[in-house]
Amino acid sequence: MAGEWQNGKEKLPARERILALVDPGSFREIGEEIKSRIGGFGTEEDCWRPSGVITGYGTVEGRPVVVYSQDASVMAGTLGKKQGEKIVRAFRMAMENRCPLIGIHDSGGARIQEGVDALAGYGEIFYYQTLASGYIPQISVIAGNCAGGAAYSPGLTDFVFMVKPIGNMYVTGPRVVETVLHQKVAAQEFGGAKMHGRRSGVAQFSCEDEQDCYRQVRKLLSIIPHFYGDNARGKECPAVHEKKAGEEIEKILPSRKSSVYQMRQVISCLVDQGDFLETGKEFAPSILTGFGKMEGACVGIVANQPYSMGGVLDVDSSVKAARFIRYCDCFDLPVITLVDVPGFMPGQSQEERGIIRHGAKLLYAYAESTVPKITVILRRAYGGAYIAMGSRHLGADFVYAWPGAEIAVMGEEAAVEILCGKKLKKMREEDRREQFLKLSGQYRTEVMNTRAALEQGYVDGILRPSQTRERICGDLRMLRGKMRGDRVRKKHGNIPL
């Protein structure tokens, strides 16, 4: 009956979802016979029914995982006391056995009939999620409604996958909004994959259907560590790819400084087999984050994207990168930073949204992280954004630049306006333009280069694009034993949330 109900909604049944995720024949259910009592306010029946969630363990590519899948055919998947207990047990099992936990969400929120017991169930889940954070990866799949308290659980996990046609997530659902605020909203527009993937940034992955979603989850699990301290390494990348990638990377940067290019092409030339798993692809597109492998070992990559707003840092891109860096630091993943940034986004809107506070998160994340950090400045690094993008001053182990890279407080036009503006205003218009161009060229030649940074040791050397992968791989081998102890004795810092 559950399968018919789910398929009628073009969704897989709860158990079939787990089977689509894990290796064939590997799933073992825990607590199959646990039931909840149905009754109470507004309910005529008084009986015992399944708890509304399936929990157990299996493997993904031979490695253990713990999974739970909410069953929307049982009281819309709402969470009561027994369902909460089963999910908490799943978290404890995952922590005790050091393996990832995947939750497949399809729930109408707290079971109203159970009152405070339902709320207590959510509270205990949140508590164990916080304990597990940074120890094991937590992954959420939104494959139906995820409303009310149910939405905060995915918000605490590391990665959120949303199935476009059927996934919705909101703290207050459309019916509540209409009742309280008298506003009619469509579920998909209000809390669908498009909204959370592009605008809120809650979802890191948007999937075309459920099968696509479980394929993407499996791919992520094949790359990232499965627990803190998991240092498993894969096979080294064949040299043939390295040679071909070295030839391709030389052609990517355009000859004109003002022209854009696709940073994903650079990343593809650096990682094994060109395989880059991007996170948050649609959100804050001026910065790229994601995972790849270098000589078989997983690394995190943060890169400005010149193709979007010139690669500028704004509120959203700062937060996106900061959270990703903190994830990498949790699981001892090296961070490779590729820099081509004109600065932080100016303007009243950004100031009102808190660019100071949110930009500080990026500074904090880089400075706090103790993993190996390697930075390459491809073309430009201006002002505070130069500092924020993994600079030596925030603890980068190695910093390199490509030929012709520019490091400066600001671009030449803005600098000349500030430094020479009064002088230029006194000139005749025809002379003013000629002098402005002359001073801009002089500033670019004398100031906008890597000479001072090299002399002061802020940049370790100039690399040809084709040398970049080889140098990074060599540095990563050397940094494998980097000490990561506490630098200052304290409880913890106060990140500018």
Image (cartoon, grey):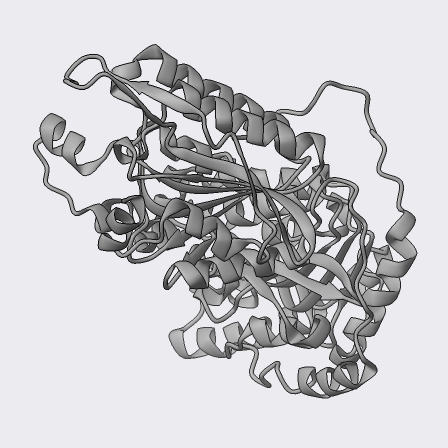
Along the line of sight, which residue is nearer the eye, 143 or 390? 143
Residue at the image position 53 percent from the left and 75 percent from the top? 262
Horizontal relation, residue 5 to residue 496: left or right: left
For residue 459, above or below residue 107: below
Task: Locate residue 41: give its quadrant.
Answer: top left
For residue 442, above or below residue 330: below
Task: Locate residue 1: give its quadrant.
Answer: top left
Along the line of sight, which residue is nearer the eye, 212 or 438? 212
Residue 410 visible in the shown view: no
Q: Position of residue 473 (x, y in %)?
A: 83, 66
Residue at the image position 7 percent from the left and 32 percent from the top? 182
Residue at the image position 37 percent from the left and 55 percent from the top? 163
Furthest residue to the left?
A: 182
Horizontal relation, residue 172 to residue 103: left or right: left
Q: Position of residue 400 (x, y in %)?
A: 78, 65
Along the line of sight, which residue is nearer the eye, 471 or 125? 125
